[in-house]
Amino acid sequence: MTFPVIGMVGGGQLARMTHEAGIPLGIRFRLLSDTPQDSAAQVVRDVVVGDYRDLDTLRDFARGCDVITFDHEHVPTEHLRVLEAEGIPVRPGPDALVHAQDKGVMRARLSEIGIPCPRHRIVADPADVTRFAGEGAAGEGAAREEGWPVVLKTVRGGYDGKGVWVVSSEAEAAEPFRAGVPVLAEEKVDYVRELAANVVRSPHGQAVAYPVVESIQVDGVCDTVIAPAPGLSPELSAHAQETALTIAKELGVTGHLAVELFETRDGRVLVNELAMRPHNSGHWTQDGAVTSQFANHLRAVLDLPLGDPRPRAPWTVMANVLGGDYPDMYQGYLHCMARDPRLKIHMYGKDVKPGRKVGHVNTYGDDLADVRERAAHAAAYLRGTITE
Amino acid sequence: MTFPVIGMVGGGQLARMTHEAGIPLGIRFRLLSDTPQDSAAQVVRDVVVGDYRDLDTLRDFARGCDVITFDHEHVPTEHLRVLEAEGIPVRPGPDALVHAQDKGVMRARLSEIGIPCPRHRIVADPADVTRFAGEGAAGEGAAREEGWPVVLKTVRGGYDGKGVWVVSSEAEAAEPFRAGVPVLAEEKVDYVRELAANVVRSPHGQAVAYPVVESIQVDGVCDTVIAPAPGLSPELSAHAQETALTIAKELGVTGHLAVELFETRDGRVLVNELAMRPHNSGHWTQDGAVTSQFANHLRAVLDLPLGDPRPRAPWTVMANVLGGDYPDMYQGYLHCMARDPRLKIHMYGKDVKPGRKVGHVNTYGDDLADVRERAAHAAAYLRGTITE
């Protein structure tokens, strides 16, 4: 057999959807999963259950693979260096991945290469946070004269709103330091909206840029993504894509890179966060682009030529389905499918817990208001927030 | 867990692609496969290896499932009646499926409900074939005055050109009778091309019709499918769709029904064959329609509302990839993906044997000649028929 074996670390929905994209390519997919019931483990044949933090587990897993890639960014950098030293391609590699794992390292490097970021620095304690706030009192982008509120982030470990605090006083600034992890302070950007400029880059340097999208967060979690971002000027869109491509190249990223951005009131973009894996802001591509982020991530990781990232419809919208009060996602299918025969449902096979990402829906068409309404309705109905 | 378990009998590529379509729906997929290496068995978690012809194997398999469906049509009708009697939904049911399994039964029923077919009857021996040829000497659609050539088919067991003979004399007519299976004789229709009118029907009677496609056969095997059939009049297209919908309804088909048709020189359609499962003539839908045949087959089998069958592009072409001299399909990816970033590859994970269906490619776009060329080139390159 000539088809390569891709080993993906992490059994969540990103791995599930990557496996789905790998099936038509004939690629053999191997999964390292925390449990046998993880989202991806339910649909993959070749599953190893084990702890990715254990080096021996990781090495044994990698030994059967032609390349290793990731559903999440928590694999210790040192372990990845061991794998690379033993001749197993790791994509993205640890030197790139550390910029998605450590926000302090990321901010330092982006500043080094001249990528616009919110004002930021590592802060030592709550008093230092107050000093940081003061440094920005008259600075660019500050929301208020006195520099509050301030955004505090642990440099490692955050996702979906966790590990991030918005504080308005020195007293409120105490909590983040309790984790014992370095804390990064950032100005709270007065943004008009959040965008994502996602790109895919392969080991031989080919890269493609997806249309820039608008990302709407609710309670720190992605709620809706609109592709392309409505009303975004071609100039700002191109600038956002070039920014993402530059980051991918300078950091040596291979695979999918999600660059989350703030669009400021005065029409600039500042980089918020990076993710080096398929990303929530790219799920729309499964139905809305010629080549999905999952298919292109696989192609990049395998050093194959990349697929066309262009949109297939004027508007595509993704709405996340979060767990609500109903444990049964399936019972909503009858209504949702009957109401919208064009609806594209993507469920993750995960147990429903309140607020947990259990799936998403994609809609597409010519009329943005209609496309948004269809996605929002389906997501709300499946969640149980509405009942008709 | 509330998501249903679909049991699919048969581990070929149709099951593989049906599982692929089931992943985003969160459906649990169970497979009864001949071997652990079958196309679908490589990518499905819940695989039972066993012989579908053994009733106990089939019953044990079905016991864990909410509904049974098929990758092929070889499951003995009597076994399916046992499953139904034991309360397990079988879709399509044996009463419908027999019309895809037995060409004699199919012809009789279609004639009964007034569906146009080639002139046909069961023939007892080679002399009877000569009589059949003579019956059509001056009849409608006969190719020659004397009624030869004649098409002979064993009523059960044929596919991809097997079990079908085109004979031009009584002497040539001897071979089909050696199988010991009843033989159906049909006039050789003087057709301008072959079409397929595929539909999906659910247990509560909802049905959708896909665009009618042109199907080009080479050596009795499907080579290329063009969607929609170029130059087909709206009237003949609607008539073909209505014919397929009528057959689905009258035969009580649930799931996907492929109706293969001849388009005659005088602008009529005659039914050639039926298949009650996803079909080669519908693979284009994976990239060219809003809802693929695989997704809609699943929805019908689960009695869910059906998805929109409309095309997403002006033209979509599928080209089969057959095994050639190269055992390595993967090495062709570099060239094919670089040449055409919009190419959609669908490989089956099967060992390459000459002439064997090992995958297909889909292309789509505005310019039919270009879309056809891209598909043909990729299929030929992967097969090894061309090398640049």
Image (cartoon, coloured by chain):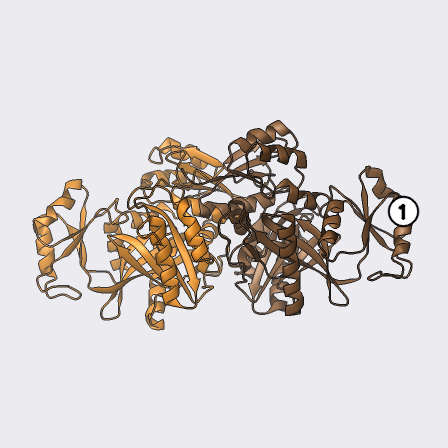
Chain colours: A orange, B brown
Residue B273 at what x, y percent from top left? 71, 51
Number of on-image labels? 1
Residue B367 at what x, y percent from top left? 59, 69
Residue B346 at what x, y percent from top left? 57, 51
Q: Label 1 crowding class (10 Å Cα cut-off): few <14, some 14-19, many 20+?
A: some
In front here: A147 or B122?
A: B122
Q: Quadrant of the C terminus of chain B?
A: bottom right
| Above or below A252: residue B80 | above
| Residue A96 visible to the viewer | no
Residue found at x 67% / y 66%:
B236
In front here: B264 or B98?
A: B98
Left or right: B74 in relation to A137: right
In front here: B301 or B46?
A: B301
Residue found at x 59% / y 50%:
B256
For label 1, the SS is: helix
| Above or below B51: residue B289 | below
| Above or below A209: residue B220 | above
Left or right: B171 in relation to B19: right
| Above or below B41: residue B281 | below
| Residue A122 visible to the viewer | yes
Residue B108 at what x, y percent from top left? 75, 49
- For disc 1, the marked residue is B128
- Residue farthest to the top? B56
Q: Quadrant of the N terminus of chain B?
A: top left
Could you tell me the amino acid type at mark 1? Answer: Asp
Residue found at x 43% / y 49%:
A333
Choose top left, top right, bottom left or bottom right for residue A76.
top left
Left or right: B239 in relation to A138: right
The answer for which chain carries disc 1 is B
